[in-house]
Image: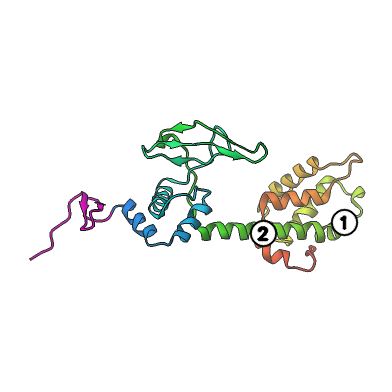
């Protein structure tokens, strides 16, 4: 005797819980996510909610639904009316904000934000590992920038000690070469690269018509990034062009 094919719609398990299937008799995406989060401990669910700046209140079933909703549609942003409160999904499906506690005033500030679910712009849902990786990347970037401010000053100051005798075009050429040597991902087109440096030179011209070379170089790092921030930061001193 063959297995009976499941039909689209909701069917009840022995426990009485309704489970939704698609036309092929497979679990819907929502049910797959519900199964995924239901198997997690409360602490794990809160890790996901915390990573996405969502409210942590409620029993496990409520936490599961918050995670399912977040991965399906995106995390709820902060309230656009009071700018501080956290949005939540009301029992009727609408998105509301009840306000927030103002520590400076020592009182709770109420908010009457209420909107249809579809009208609220969500933000991408992230896993705890993704957030941790992003934070690690930021720390590496910060460390590299600190290395720039400490180590690059000496090297750049030495390279441009006779800056008064150099024209902006010559300074731009030297900075492009220096940046590439130190793994800054400059545009491959030399003309465009010099143009970008030239723009930063004009933005960082001092009253005596010299340039803040450190600020210009930092601007290049911020704008184009480096191919290996961690590796570049680990050098004892930055590399000078040969």
What residue lies at 90% left-to-right and 39% top-to-bottom? Answer: 207
Query: Which residue is located at x 27 percent, y 55 percent?
Result: 27
Q: Main secondary structure of the magenta part?
A: loop
Which residue does the image show at 89% across and 41% down from the upper left? 209
Q: Is residue 196 left or right of residue 155?
A: left
Q: Earlier in the sequence, mark 1 or mark 2?
A: 2
Identify the mark at residue 157; answer none if there is no mark: 1
Name the mark on residue 31. none
Asked if one can make out residue 112 in the rendered structure from this viewpoint, the answer is: yes
Q: Nearer the viewer, residue 136 or 163?
A: 136
User: Residue 14 in magenta?
Assistant: yes
* Residue 5, quarter of the rendered image: bottom left
Vertical relation: 125 (above or below) 43: above
Where residue 152 appears, as percent x and y from the top left, is: 81, 59
Asked if residue 169 lies in the magenta stretch, the reply is: no
Q: Report whether residue 127 is seen.
A: no
Q: Which mark is residue 139?
A: 2
């Amino acid at each position: 005797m063959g297995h009976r094919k499941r039909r689209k719609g909701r069917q009840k398990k022995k426990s009485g819980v309704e489970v939704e299937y698609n036309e092929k008799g497979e679990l819907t995406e929502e049910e797959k996510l519900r199964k995924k989060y239901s198997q997690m401990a409360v602490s794990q669910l809160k890790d996901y909610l915390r990573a996405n700046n969502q409210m942590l209140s409620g029993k496990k079933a409520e936490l599961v639904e918050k995670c399912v909703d977040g991965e399906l549609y995106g995390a709820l942003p902060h309230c656009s009316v009071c700018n501080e409160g956290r949005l939540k999904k009301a029992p009727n499906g609408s998105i509301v904000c009840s306000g927030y506690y103002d520590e400076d005033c020592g009182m709770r500030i109420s908010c009457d934000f209420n909107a249809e679910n579809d009208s609220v712009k969500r933000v991408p849902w992230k896993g705890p590992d993704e957030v941790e990786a992003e934070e690690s990347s930021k720390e590496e970037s910060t460390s590299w920038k600190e290395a720039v401010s400490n180590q690059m000053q000496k090297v750049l100051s030495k390279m441009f000690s006779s800056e008064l005798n150099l024209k902006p075009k010559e300074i731009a050429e030297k900075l492009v070469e220096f940046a590439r040597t130190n793994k800054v991902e400059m545009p491959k087109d030399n003309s465009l690269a010099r143009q970008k440096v030239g723009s930063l030179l004009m933005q960082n011209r001092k009253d005596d018509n010299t340039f803040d070379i450190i600020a210009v170089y930092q601007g290049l790092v911020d704008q184009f990034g480096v191919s290996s921030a961690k590796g570049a930061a680990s050098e004892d001193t930055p590399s000078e062009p040969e």
